[in-house]
Amino acid sequence: MTVKEKIMSETSHPFWLMVEKEISDHVRSLRLIIMVVLIALTSIATVYLALGSLKDAIKPGDPEGSFLFLKIFTASNGSIPPFHVFIGFLGPLLGISLGFDSINSELGRGTMSRLLAQPIHRDYIINAKFVAALIVISGLFLCLGLLVTGWGILKIGILPTFQEFFRILALVVLTIFYVAFWLNLAIFFSIRFKQASTSALASIAVWLFVTVFYGMLVSLVARSIAPSEFAPPGRIIAYQKLVQNLGRLVPSQLFSDATTTLLMPSVRSLGPLTMEQVHGAIPSPLSLGQSLLVVWPQLTGLIAATVVCFALSYRAFMRKEIRSR
Amino acid sequence: MGAEIIRLSGLTKEYGQQAVVRDLDLTIGKGEIYGLLGPNGAGKSTTILMIMGLTEPSSGTIRVAGIDPVRQPAEVKRKVGYLPEDVGFYDDRTGLENIVYTGRLNGLTASAAKTRALELLERVGLTDAAHKRAGTYSRGMRQRLGLADVLIKQPEIIILDEPTLGLDPEGLRRFLSLIVALSRQEGLTVLLSSHHLQQVQQVCDRVGLFVAGRLIAEGNIRELSKKLFSNELIAYEAGLYRGVRTDGDWIPLRSRAADAVRNTGGVRNFHVEGDRFFWESDIESGHEIARKMIASDVDLSYLNRKEYGLDEIYHRYFSTVAKS
């Protein structure tokens, strides 16, 4: 029996069949190809420039000197932002493009009621959409991370240490979670709104608000409640913390905090540090475990946001009455 | 009517305050072709959705092949094929791929699904288009592909929601005869909803008339018309054959024939339009009048007793419902 015959003679679980079909839809779609080309081009540009400015990035006595490899992801000559910032920018777009029409397009084409007439559970549909897009995203970012690593090895001739490698993997996992959040948000809008264009616009509006306007809003609020220069240090610290925590209400801030910590091992804290806390500390990089501890709240926050979005979509979908178009 | 396969009792569906389906009792036998007729918004689609377990009834019970679709929707969907109104396919996949996917979702292996899909496509006359993208299909082809899609799971019952909508007359005729053939050959029970009365009349064993969420009448066409028109007069129409007679000859002859008809017992509402006579009668009067006409030297080109079709039945029910 050849492999093909074997595949042909097996029955698959309907859920995995649906995932399979969704993945092949994604892979064939022009939309994904455009996004992949966009991400690939920006990655090539940023990594190329980072490699070029690598020798300037390492200063003598820099505690991160031993993490030369990670500089590929963070270095930039100032003309364009580094790799991790770009991924933080394009990742949400990828998530949105994979999710914004997942449910409403099925409704609009009239395939939803046909699908629901098959002996499958209703939640398979939304779960399959999510899992398929997640698999596509994971594959994409894993490839991207490994390709950049490989390119770096070829170019600078130094192998990444285990720690560096695991930091890169952690970055990939983090990016997947971050994109999954946007994916779920887009799926939620695709259930809520009948028109694919409305849900795409709504998702992009949220994305713009979060990445551009929210920061402005926070600094506006911060300025209006700023304590005087002569306020006691306790108040100033409390104020700083408040402003930071306001900023962290949005997932993009969580993502950028987390990537910075993972890629720059010398980052010891994401909050304000007092002189007392820093006093006596040796300016050495943190171990991977310690860095992960620092970003643990960010990571759980991102996962929680993803789960909340998915739960909302799930609920909305299960309660939606599906009639023919 | 064979053993019952679908039974609805006391079925009610309310959206907020408004009842879309009210206290519906309906039994469909195995192998029957049952037509659900009614205007738009009468609750036909909602009833179908409830039978499929896609919508929960507000009250009442449903049994489909002994299964309760509220509790075991997946089991019902295994036995029932459902063709939704204005069915859609994945436009960027071929017709074959579309129904193979459905077959595999129903637990067929890839090769079994493909074999069966090709068989069905041949049966519905889509062999040539099997490898074309479904997006290029015409309305009639989509409908036939939908039928293949419904049949690939080898259902016991098929439910077609407005299957005749948007088909041209020839496509419609072929589609309906396909359904009848399938039902007769494979003992399939067919439930179809429609407002195309003429065609439904031709294919259905029984019909149910649906108005404003209620089933107001049920039975086969003859039963329905008997029930409705039993106290009615029988309407006749006769066409006279003039031949080559001149006006001078013909007009007196015609008025003599008209008098003969008018004076026959039981004839009412007699009137003449050109060379045609119309009258109503409370007893069978056609044979007698034909004899009288020929006796008065007037030839008949036709004599017609009006049969009540579904259109009239439908119309009549509507006017009675509107009045009440």
Image (cartoon, grey):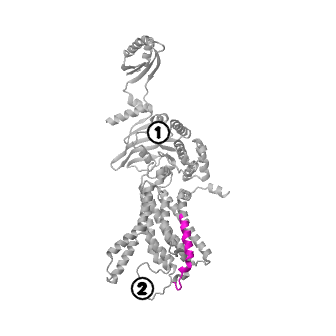
Relative to A186, is A43 above or below? Answer: below
Check residue B34 in the rendering and tell me which mark sits there, or answer none. 1
* Quadrant, the C terminus of chain B: top left
Q: In the rendered structure, which amino acid carries the disc numbered 2?
A: Gln
For mark 2, what is the residue? A277
Front label number (2 vs 1): 2
The Cα–Cα distance between marks 2 and 1, rounded to whole angstroms, is: 82 Å
* Residue A38 locus on image (x, y percent): 53, 64
Q: Residue furthest bottom?
A: A280
Question: In the image, is residue A58 part of the stretch drawn in magenta?
Answer: yes
Q: Is label 2 in a helix, a strand or a loop? A: helix
Residue B121 lies in what quarter of the image?
A: top right
Magenta residues, start to end: A38-62
Q: Residue furthest right?
A: A1
- Which residue is at 51% across, 59% downward? A128
Asked if labels 1 and 2 touch by Cβ distance under 8 angstroms, the answer is no
* Residue A120 locus on image (x, y percent): 50, 54
Q: Chain of mark 2?
A: A
Q: In the rendered structure, which amino acid carries the disc numbered 1?
A: Tyr
Relative to B76, is B282 above or below? Answer: above
